[in-house]
Amino acid sequence: MIQSISDKIVQHAIRNEYIKQEQRDEYVYALNMLLNILITDATMLCIGFLMGMIWECIIFWLIYKVLRKYCGGFHFGTSWKCYLSSCIMCPAVLAAIRYVPYDKAIWGVLTAAMAAALFILSPVAAENKPLDEKEKQVFGSIAKVLVIMIMICWCIATLILHNEALSKIISLSIFSVTAFVIAGKIHLTVLRHK
């Protein structure tokens, strides 16, 4: 559906001579990506609003998206599957923030372990999003810096501010990205041995 909307918008722009016919594919791709991002972000905000956890949703989604961009990991084959996974993950994370009991020591150990896994494994390419050597180097460096910065934020939220909700949000962002990174690593390993 988004693909056909992108096609129609670009065809309209071509007819009105805003863009050239030979640029069609690039514009359709870019518009398709933009619309997917806007729809997914708007849906996550709606979920946060409906659950009465808008700021928790915004902070989680921002940390998750930035980490995911540079850490990589498993990617679904279609934007529709990616959208559905986000629609499942977001309310699950918000429910965990609200209902899962908080023990600073347990959450701390799990968060440190997941952050260490991200630090070591990142970046992980995906079957449909390969990385060349330069991208691996750049994304890996950025991922490591981000993991360290986010762990510093977690320490501040947990040990200085004593903000349980913020601590959980940061932890669950790290857990979610780590799950995709590990799944991506396993998926690539399975593909290589076929």
Image: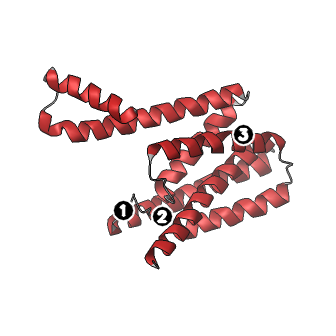
The C terminus sits in image quarter: bottom left
Which label was assigned to residue 32?
A: none
Tell me which residue sits at (62%, 59%) in the image.
Answer: 179
Judging depth in this view, the residue of 52 and 143 nearest the camera is 52
Residue at image mark 1 = 135
Q: Is residue 187 left or right of residue 171?
A: left
Residue at image mark 2 = 123
Q: Which x, y percent locates residue 160? A: 78, 47
CA distance for labels 3 and 1 = 32 Å
Query: So how many labels did they put on this image?
Result: 3
Q: Which x, y percent locates residue 100? A: 83, 47
Query: Of the residues shown, which amino acid type is indicated by label 1?
Result: Glu
Which label was assigned to residue 94?
A: 3
Q: Which x, y percent locates residue 153? A: 66, 49
| Residues at discs 2 and 1 in contact (Cβ within 8 Å) | yes
Whether residue 18 is visible here, answered yes or no, is no
Tell me which residue sits at (39%, 62%) in the image.
Answer: 138
- Mark 2 and mark 1 lie on one chain; the one further toward the N terminus is 2
* Local SS, label 3: helix
Tell me which residue sits at (71%, 59%) in the image.
Answer: 111
In the displayed image of the protein, which residue is found farthest to the top?
16
Colour style of the rendered protein structure? secondary structure
